[in-house]
Amino acid sequence: MKVVITAQRAAWDAPVDARFGRARTFVLVDTESRELQEIPNSQALDATQGAGVQAAALVCRTGAEAIVTGHCGPKAFAALAAGGVKVFTGAEGTVADAVTSLVAGQLHQADAADVAGHWV
Amino acid sequence: MIVAIASGKGGTGKTTVALSLALAAGRPVRLLDCDVEEPNCHLFLDGEVVAREEVFLPTPAVDAGACTACGLCGEICEFGGIIVLPTGAYVFPTLCHACGACVQLCPAGALREVPRRIGELTEMRAGSITLFTGRLDVGQTLAPPLVRAVRARGEGNGLVIIDAPPGTSCPVVAAVHGADVAVLVTEPTPFGLHDLELAVEAVRRLQVPFGVVINRAGAGDARVADFCAREGISVLLEIPQERRIAEAYARGLPVVTAAPELRPAFCSLLDGLDRLRTPAVARAHMGS
């Protein structure tokens, strides 16, 4: 399965970035082949507003089945849901830890945003 | 003459100055409450609402059958107001700034604009004052279009006084841009000075001539006056720190009603603003 992890860098030992929309970078991981690819989040990082939805659009375009992150707000969640991407929140540790937890079924699949939106 | 009453810091006395200027003018005044997130001029005036209208912004709507998910709309939008997923385009109305670019660009003709209400505008008659008030709906975040709607509806001949929002961001720029002259209201405190410096920078960039009113004079120290002297900024009026004025304000009474002896000072303030504005007019006539 292909999943996107929010991380500080594109590496197995990189810390997970708890933010979704303004995540430092995205890592596209194939959980079977263990391939790892960086998907830069530069557009959303530089956005004055709407980082969450722009990041969600980017994730949807990768063809990933799921996103693994710390937290996800309401607009980003709506966009990911519209794109058919499952959202797993509460990830901690490294990218490798997050993938291990996901495969072991230890991460929570969110059915709604777990944090409030911003007022801009 | 269009006078914008602004400030960096909130709660310095913009409404106090705007109302007192309007009441002291002794002629018909159009007062525009452009602090659309928390309008309050009406609380100080007795009058009758003679007109009320809704304000809408054009927002894109997607014809899902026609959308080819080409991605152009999502690329042009700076604000995440519309995004394109493999399944098609999705609109996030509260992020949309209503520029219309996505609708213009869509090669499939899948987007059209639909009106989305962001607030309302009222017109109230209170003696010599006609008050135009913008009120942003709860949950809406885009104040500048409503500020512009209030100005489009309210500006006219004679004296126009704009009560601007606090700060230096987009709603303030929308309220002050193109005014003949601006008044920056501040207080003689560290916060007052800090935010005044920001406001001065903003108003200078907007090329609107301005002067300063120091409210609650005597409550702090000389740092604001020193700054104005250093920068060559006119201090047009000082309103003294007096419990009587604060009590009147809390009861919904304008300063010139509670402290009638200040009325001539506000008349002089108007004259001072007229003089501040004149050099700019002269410059414009010379074409420089």
Image: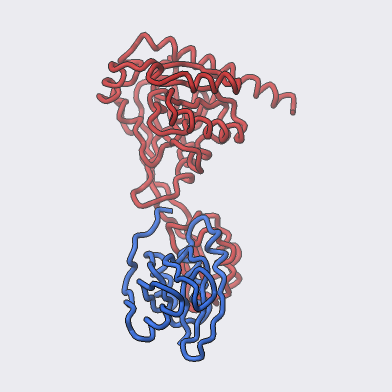
Chain colours: A blue, B red
Name the residue rendered at 32%, 70% in the picture. Answer: A112
Q: Nearer the viewer, residue A21 or B32?
A: A21
Name the residue rendered at 34%, 18% in the picture. Answer: B255
Residue B35, quarter of the rendered image:
top left
Q: Nearer the viewer, residue B3 or B131?
A: B3
B123 w.r.t. B126: above or below? below
- Counting from the top left corner in percent of width and height, residue B54 is at 39, 46
Q: Nearer the viewer, residue B27 or B170?
A: B170
The C terminus of chain B, quarter of image: top right
Name the residue rendered at 51%, 91% in the picture. Answer: A33
Residue B190, quarter of the rendered image:
top left
Residue at the outermost bottom position: A32
Q: Nearer the viewer, residue B213 or B54?
A: B213
- Counting from the top left corner in percent of width and height, residue B58 is at 48, 55
The N terminus of chain B, quarter of image: top right
B229 lies left or right of A64:
right
Residue at the outermost front position: A13
Labels in figure, total: 0
On the question of residue B151 being in view, the answer is: yes
On the question of residue B88 being in view, the answer is: no
- Counting from the top left corner in percent of width and height, residue B43 is at 30, 30
Name the residue rendered at 38%, 24% in the picture. Answer: B16
- Counting from the top left corner in percent of width and height, residue B198 is at 53, 34
